[in-house]
Amino acid sequence: MEEFSLAENTRLIIKENVLAVICDNGLKTVGSAIFNGGCKQVKAVLNIGVPEGYSDLFLHLDPLQLITSSAAIVGITKDYLAMVTAAKIRNYSLVCKKTDDYTIYVAATAGCSHGESSGEDMAVEEIVGTINIIVFIDGNPAESCMVAALITATEAKSAALRDFDVRSRYTGDSATGSITDAVTVAATGRGKEVVLGGPASKLGKLVGYCARKAVTEALLKQEPIWANRTVFDRLKERHLPIEKLAAEVSKIEDLALTTEELTQILKHNPQTLATLLAATKMDDDYNKNLLPTDFKDWNAATQTPNKTTAQETNYDAVNLPPFIKTALIKIIKAQQHKQVGK
């Protein structure tokens, strides 16, 4: 068990699958916790990890059984709220900032193997990966300030995912979170009332900093892969695996090649990989009708030059986003010319 003092009569406890902020004097809270969320007065805020082997079906049919049994681990039986995560509680991160008026702690657990982009169409088949955030304020924010702080923490979470270039499992778009994320803001109510909690406010700046750093650290502890991906990995996350690239460009008869051959072309020239990754950004903008004004005539910008043979007339059959399609064809042609020149 780990235990830290956060403020007078308030402590953070990590024991087995439970992370708990416990305040003997009570906390006012605002949040999206699955159990007792909303605007509440509680004595404990819990983040509960789902034990290995625990039935996902049973969890969603009866989450209360896991919640109550886990709360008992830290001696809590009433006056609490709880969030649930598949991430390991031991992989939590705790970040703190202090001023003369208040102290901010953010505790986060994070997994994003099921990234999503809010607003897209989703057909959910499984639930894995959750980012849970507890913002603890030893101070006296107004209720509206706490809501603003919750929004600020959520923005910081999305910013951390953008830093890692996490993509949606459904569309390959930039991820804003995972489908089961939760945020709770808890405050002791001590001191002078604080009104503003947005990202530019004094309190909001601290909340944003702590939340972004805590999510970043927790995500790397839970899923270190986010700091160790290849360009091929990142293309696949955009629904552009190397197998698809090879199959599509091979529709052009004189450019036909296997997955292995394309892999070797790209691997032996890191600059080509950088070009492809840069092209995906342009395609993101194209798909959202946000191309820079330099590319108003995008047909000209993405036109593959030198269509000189009958075999090349089927360029339009290549079903790839326009900028990556153009870049890939140019890369392959350059490699062919190099081989011919040898």
Image (cartoon, helix red, strand yellow):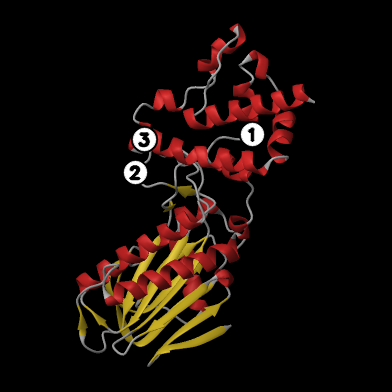
Q: Relative to 277, is 85 above or below?
A: below
Q: Residue at x 57, y 69 (%)?
A: 91
> For the residue carrying disc 3, how many other residues have a C-alpha within 10 Å: few (<14), some (14-19), or many (20+)?
few
Q: Furthest residue to the front?
A: 341
What is the C-alpha distance between the residues marked 3 and 2?
28 Å
Query: Could you say whether the residue bearing mark 1 is in a helix, strand or loop?
Result: helix
Return the disc, 2 or 1, that comes first in the chain's sequence: 2
Q: Amino acid at mark 3?
A: Asp
Q: Amino acid at mark 2?
A: Gly
> For the residue carrying disc 2, how many other residues have a C-alpha within 10 Å: few (<14), some (14-19), or many (20+)?
few
Asked if the residues shown at circle 1 and circle 3 are in contact, with their CB atoms under 8 angstroms apart, the answer is no
For the C terminus, the quadrant is top right
| Residue with the mark numbered 3 | 294
Residue 90 visible from this viewpoint:
yes
Q: Quadrant of residue 90?
A: bottom right
Question: Which marked residue is nearer to the observer: mark 3 or mark 2?
Answer: 3
Q: Residue at x 60, y 58 (%)?
A: 227
| Residue with the mark numbered 1 | 242
> For the residue carrying disc 1, how many other residues have a C-alpha within 10 Å: few (<14), some (14-19), or many (20+)?
some
Using the image, tell me which numbered label, if any, was put on residue 119: 2
Judging depth in this view, the residue of 243 and 126 nearest the camera is 243
User: Can you give x and y, in whole percent of width and height, for residue 284 in the image?
Assistant: 43, 38
Return the disc, 1 or 3, that comes first in the chain's sequence: 1
Q: Quadrant of residue 8?
A: bottom left
Tally of numbered tags: 3
Query: Could you say whether the residue bearing mark 2 is in a helix, strand or loop?
Result: loop
User: Can you give x and y, in whole percent of width and height, for residue 73 in the image?
Assistant: 52, 78
Judging depth in this view, the residue of 177 and 25 nearest the camera is 177
Q: Residue at x 37, y 40 (%)?
A: 120
